[in-house]
Image (spheres, grey):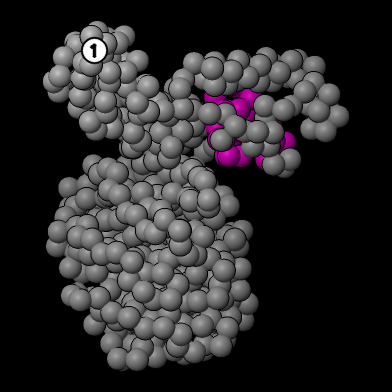
Amino acid sequence: MVKLIHTLADHSDDVNCCAFSFSLLATCSLDKTIRLYSLSDFTELPHSPLKFHTYAVHCCCFSPSGHILASCSTDGTTVLWNTENGQTLAVMEQPSGSPVRVCQFSPDSTCLASGAADGTVVLWNAQSYKLYRCGSVKDGSLVACAFSPNGSFFVTGSSCGDLTVWDDKMRCLHSEKAHDFGITCCNFSSQPVSGGEQGLQFFRLASCGQDCQVKIWVVSFTHIFGFELKYKSMLSGHCAPVLACAFSHDGQMLVSGSVDKSVIVYDTNTENILHTLTQHTRYVTACAFAPHTLLLATGSMDKTVNIWQFDLETLCQARSSEGHLKQFTEDWSEEDVSTWLCAQGLKDLVGIFKKNNIDGKELLNLTKESLADDLKIESLGLRSKVLRKIEELRTRVKFLSSEIPDEFICPITRELMKDPVIASVTIVVFSGHPIYRKNKSIICGARPLGFKSQMAILMKRKQWKIGSEQRNVRVP
């Protein structure tokens, strides 16, 4: 399912960070250099290594276009590089002169955030290279930073264990103690968990720290509803501090690297461990997924960067267990459709479906004519098999739409909520007839049930009686 395809051993000291663009891999090290490699054959570019920093380079990241690389260092500077020729475009000095530990571009490339050891965070204008905004956290060094996929806010992590959320005007929206003994890394999934009304979107955020934990958070923010950060779960597997974490480009996997020298790959839907990689001989300090291929890079204090490749077919098989894909087919992404095809034994069609951008909605609308004329699937047997499988999905959609009340569907994941909760209901008798008055909403998962649904559940289970009293009821 995953295999080591290349090892880069050009750095002369610990590897601190690695980052992908669509065509390049960048690595940086305590040896004060940044190195660039071509993804086609993993050869180092002619103008690599990039040399400017006078002390250790802690972090590097590409702009979304891949034309600019940013690096930051203990020397107190953040440097922008032209990736085509290796020339420096700008040298931006942290106002306090403090060592810069982390840097990150905004999704639209307009801003670059840099966080320093003295707790200051600076937003730079990435076009003019001038300081735009500056802020600071109360305690600790800033060691982690991640922009939300829509660019409306970003998160910083500190050595004291706090996650701090900032909007694009550098106003502090929220601060929360996330990890004992300090945060080491944080990363957003580029794929929203779900869309919502009035522009509300939910994003997954992963954080890791010195407490040996990897935590998953669900984050939402709009100017209408404000900001909300909710702790979701903790991923187990490491037995020592976790130094790095990163989501795959489709949001289906999360990788983490640890002082225990291991790399763990998780399935983000089931939160199960897919793989544990133990190739490195010292602490794993960095990990990153490529933005468009199933490549993973891991860096270590053993001075190497390992390149791993995932096999699509076996990856799809691992994901094909019931409940992994989104409950509603119309919400499937193109990657979900690819996973479904592999699970149905139709791996050979993945390329055709991806080329034509077939997501869940388009999948349900496919006909025998569109399969033959638009997708150019020549085999009658293949077309018939695809149509049968699609018809099964349509039947499933109709069943779900007609049988499950919306109150029972989680508004975030659109999946059936199953965990029971305890609810409180007040029942009052007036003139010999029971009148039901709600005392408190019954909560199931993340959403309150409507009152009619509450009464339907109570009457079905016959766990109520006429009288003026309050009763506790267990709801499935």
Does residue 386 appear to the left or right of 107 in the view shown? right
Q: Magenta stretch containing residue 3, yes or no?
A: no
Instruction: Residue 430 in the image: state x and y as whole percent.
Output: 23, 16
Figure quadrant of residue 3 = top left
Q: Which residue is mark 1?
A: 431
Does residue 128 appear to the left or right of 242 in the view shown? right
The single residue placed furthest to the front in the displayed view is: 431
Q: Report whether residue 281 is seen.
A: no
Instruction: Residue 187 in the image: state x and y as whole percent.
Output: 38, 58
The relative height of residue 175 versus residue 451 in the rendered view (above or below) is below
Front-most of residues 24 and 63: 63
Front-most of residues 343 and 263: 343
Q: Magenta stretch containing residue 351, yes or no?
A: yes
Report the magenta residues as a range.
332-354
Q: What predominant SS class does the magenta segment belong to?
A: helix
Instruction: Residue 259 in the image: state x and y as whole percent.
Output: 22, 57
* Residue located at (63% from left, 77% from top): 84
Front-most of residues 73 and 39: 73
Q: Which quadrant would the C terminus be assigned to in this image?
A: top left
* Residue located at (23% from left, 61% from top): 176
The relative height of residue 308 versus residue 473 in the rendered view (above or below) is below
Instruction: Residue 429 in the image: state x and y as whole percent.
Output: 21, 15
Classed neighbour count for the residue bearing mark 1: other residues with Cα under 10 Å, few (<14), some (14–19), many (≥20): few
